[in-house]
Structures are given as structure tokens and as C-alpha cells.
Image (spheres, rainbow, N blue to C red):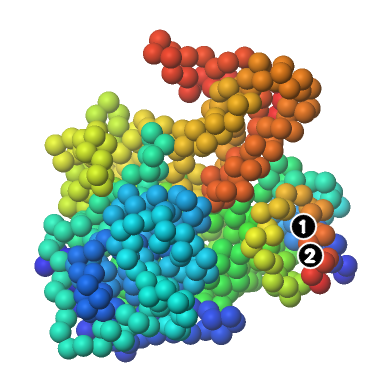
Amino acid sequence: MSIEKEFRKLIAQYSGVSPEEVAASCRFREDLGFSSLDFMSLLGEVEDEFDIELAPEKLCDIHTVGEAMNLIASMV
Amino acid sequence: MKNIRSLWDETVKKYGPLTALKWLNKKETEEITYEKFGENVKKIRRGLEVSGFAGAHIALIGGSSSEWIAGYLALVTGCNVAVPLDALLPAEELSDLLVRADCAALFLDKKLLGYAQKFLKKCPMLRNIWVLSTEEIESGDERLSSLSQLLSKGDVMFDVPGAAGSDIATIIYTSGTTGKSKGVMLTQENLSENVRSVEYEASPGCVVLSVLPIHHAYCLVMDILKTLSLGCCVCLNDSLLHMVRNIGIFKPEVMLMVPLMIETIYKKIAALEKDLDKHSIYENVLGGKLRIIFTGGAHLEPFYIDKYEELGVDILEGYGMSECSPVITSNTPSDHKKGSIGKPLKNVEISFKDGEILVRGSSVMKGYYKMPGETAAALEDGWLHTGDKGYIDEDGYLFINGRVKNLIIMSNGENVSPEEIENKLGINPLIKEVVITGENNGLTARIYPDPEVVEALDLTHEELKLALHQIIDEYNASQPSYRHVTALLIRKDPFARNTTGKIIRKDACLPVDALTG
């Protein structure tokens, strides 16, 4: 499964929308209804799933699915 | 003796060979017995005395760690005053609290070492900082060393006596309705009585996973003091990013959570429901051994209690606040009612005044540190005004049905003062009036822009919206996530005000004049 597909599947677990509906422009909080803890849990799963370690200072700049995807892609 | 020292000495004597704490170091699990941990606590306590800090106020800033807990226990089992602070606050706010709490020294998380010089410069009373690490620190500044220095200094024969029950043990900062946080003074008796009075279903060796922020009264008193006093094995969650994974690693029987955590974990459960049976979900998401979740700090929808019950986990709600050390009422495994927040603890009396819950008892705080006006307003003849409205039913269970004070309670249990955020945002000349409200587990800024500034800058509506979003983004970047503003509403008219000129908050949410979401 591609990284993007797997990431959308993880997002769908927290948002209640199907993976296909998760667009790159979606904002985690406003569009997908993520709480701050949902967001942290998602990133924890991303770390485990893709075997990467996300730097805490970079996480503040992530608001959209696309921004998160770019960060993951640059690290995998 | 009604102090934490007698409680702790009894615990170490009774449970010496059992595991007190477990934590992850990278991916390896480490642990320490009550006996060894008790030795470390004793050495730090003696080291503080030898270093000339007897009776001093000493802050702790950091995440959950065995070093943090050892430092805290050393302070409160001796005669110091511990001041746990939120490590997620900006350095300026932490400096301000260090000054306001008269801290003479500080235990600091290694990850926050970069703050050390700023604190030493801005806090004239601060004489020493010990980094919460057993490794030596090469700082070139004799005021900055590591916990190992205290441990070696404390390798002496004499010991420090425990404090009196009426002495202050801890000052915990909590959001104030005026926008300035207040230091809740809890005595030795306040804390030890709360520990003794809570009914908690766990026997020696029972595994408990601690996931709450360690500087909170609920975590400090229940996850740490209470759970250790029962001889349980307290496992430390290293990061909220990995809470679910760590449940799988440590396999706890009991956990304390705020509603937000219960809701997030439930999303995982719901996502797996179509593919896995209940037993597999219980094993995969809840570790396979979880029996009880104690929760408090915010409202929890009864829906979640039913859903977790289907998996064999009892969620027991309680009620408390830092000012009451913190637990006031609690449901217990043998005595609970859904939707209620339980019965009062045995050391608590409850009464009502105009519907507001008042609390009296041995766990009610001594007052707010150096805030006599606020203390007098909160304590009336020994009765604490909780700011919550409620009632007790015919069976003796307490229910909450509203709030008197103007604080927003987030589902992670954090109390947010809207005025504090309004004051910060309101500084910008573009913002004439702002009201912060709490909706859908987030904060909304309702802003009336200054029409003169908008006109002078010739801003279109889209440009105005962008400029306000930028102001909010800048504010968010400097604050912990629970204080983030997550939505913006721009008003075309000013807020309605009362005869004294104050904004009528209850009318602020009326959607009639919102231009945009």
C-alpha cells in the first residue's frame, strides 16, 4: 500500500470520513473534526507505521493533510 | 501524623521489593523497586538540606519521569514546598510563575535545558537549577547542575524530619477568572487526607498506567501519591503520541484519564469494530487487562460508559478541583450511578448556595498564594465556592448542571480563562473587541474588528479574515495546544454591554451578526 493511501486510512479512523474523501486541502481541526489528542495519536501511529521520528517543533506548522503528507514523504 | 512523609515511609517499608515505577527508555522498559526509589528520594531530600534549601519553595518543570517524581517526593516528604509547573507554557510565563511563587530553586527537564539561563536571569531569587537527569551536566555555571549532584550530597547519615500537617506542601497554579493564574496552597494534611479518603480498587502489584500531565493535582495525588501508597506498579507514559501503543506495552489494569482521552481511544475502537470481534479489540486497543478507568475534570457523555462497558471496562466518574486536593466526589466499583459524579469522600461536606456547590473538609486548600482578595472570595467560613452548580439526588450522588464562574472546561480537563486569551489577542490594534467561547472541544474567537483600522488599511473582507487568522496563528504558536484558538467568527457589530460597560458574555454567542465562519 502506498504511503499516501496508508496515511489516509489512518486519518479516516479518527475523522469518520472514508479514506477517499480525505483531500490534501482538508484541515485536521476545522474540516476533519480532530481534537488536539486525536492529532497527536495520529502522529504517533504515523511514527510507528512508517518508522520515522517527527520533530516536535515541526508539528506546529501542520494544519492540513497535504502539509502532513509532505512532511512524512520527506522523511520516509 | 497527617503528612505525606508518614504515608511514604509506611509505603516503602511495606512494599520495598515490589516495583514502584516502570518507564520506557527509547524502546527498552526500565523499572525501580520501592526500596531503591525510597533511597533516592531520601538522598535528594538530604541533599537539599545540605545545599542550604531547607524549607525553600522549589519548582518542577518537566514531563512524567522517575526523576521528576523522586524530586517531588523529596520535597513533600521533607519540609519544602513543591511548585509543579506546566512544561508546555512559554518560557516567559514560566519565569513569571517562578517569581510569583518565590522559588529559590528548580528541577528542570533535560529537554528544557535551553530555558535555564533565561530563568536564572529573569528570576533573581532562583539560586540553583538541577536538571532531572542522573548524568553529570557540564554547564560552566555552578548554579546549574544535575540531580546526581544532590544524590551524592545527600549520601549522609542524618535525615530531615517530615513537615507538620498544617505546613504548605504544594502550590499548584490554576486558571483564574480574572485572567491571572492563582497558586493553590495545599497543605500536608490536605494532600495526605485526600489520598487516604479516596476509595481505589487496586492491590499491591496492580499495574497502573499514568497518562495525565504530571503537574496536575489529579495526576499528582491519584496517579502518584495514592497509587504508590497502595504498592501498585505505576507505569509512565512517555508521550501522548504513543498512549495507545503504551497501553499495549504495559497492559494496565487501572488508568486515570480525562474525557478527551476516552473519546480519542474510542475512535480507534470504533474504527476496528467492523473487522474485529470485541475480545480482539480489547486485546489490541486496551491491552487486554484494563478493568477500570477513573475519569474527571470535564463532562463525559454516558455513551462512552456504555461502549467501554461492552468491552468489560468500567468507567467511573469523579469530581474535583485543585483547590480540594483535588478529589471531592467519586464513583467507586461497588457504589456508582451513571451520569452522576459519585458520592462525597468521607472527609468532605457538601452544601449549596443559590445552586452553587460549596465544599468543606480536610482537603480544602489553605488559600491562594499571596492573593488574599481571591482567597476571601473563594473561601467563606471554611466553605469553598466551587463555581459549579449541581444537586445531590435522593441516593446521595452528586450531579453537575451548570457553572457560575467564567471558565471554559476543555474535555482534556484543562480550565481555560477566556479573559487571558482575550487580553493577549486584544492588544492588536485591528481587534476592537474579542470574546473567546468554547465549542465542540475547541476555542472560538469572536472578533469585532476596529472599523477605523480596517478602513485606514483599506482591507477587503478576505484580507481582513487573513490578517485575523495570522494574529491567531501567531498567538497559537506561543501557547500549549489546549489554549489554541481553533475557529474565528468576525462580527459586523460590537458586542452588547451591560450598564457597567462589560460585555454580556451569554449574548456573545448569538449568531445573528456573524459575517463569516
C-beta proximity under 8 Å, tags 2 and 1: yes
Q: Secondary structure at mark 2?
A: helix
Most extreme residue toward the front is B140
Which residue lies at the image location 76% right of the left edge and 72% below the top edge?
Answer: A50
Where is residue B245 shown, x and y percent of the image?
60, 71
Camera sees residue B329: no
Badge 1 density bin: few <14, some 14–19, many ≥20, Cα 10 Å: some
Which residue lies at the image location 47% right of the left edge and 80% below the top edge?
Answer: B138
Badge 2 density bin: few <14, some 14–19, many ≥20, Cα 10 Å: many
Q: Nearer the viewer, residue B463 or B347?
A: B463
Q: Which chain is mark 1 on? A: A
Q: Quadrant of residue B515?
A: top right
Q: Nearer the viewer, residue B299 or B304?
A: B299
The label shown at residue A72 is: 2
Q: Which residue type does callout 1 highlight?
A: Ala
User: Do badges 2 and 1 share one subunit?
Assistant: yes
Q: Secondary structure at mark 1?
A: helix
Q: In the picture shown, does residue B314 fall above or below B484?
A: below
Q: Nearer the viewer, residue B256 or B59?
A: B59
The label shown at residue B301 is: none
Which residue lies at the image location 44% right of the left edge and 84% below the top edge?
Answer: B136
The label shown at residue A68 is: 1
Q: Which chain is mark 2 on? A: A
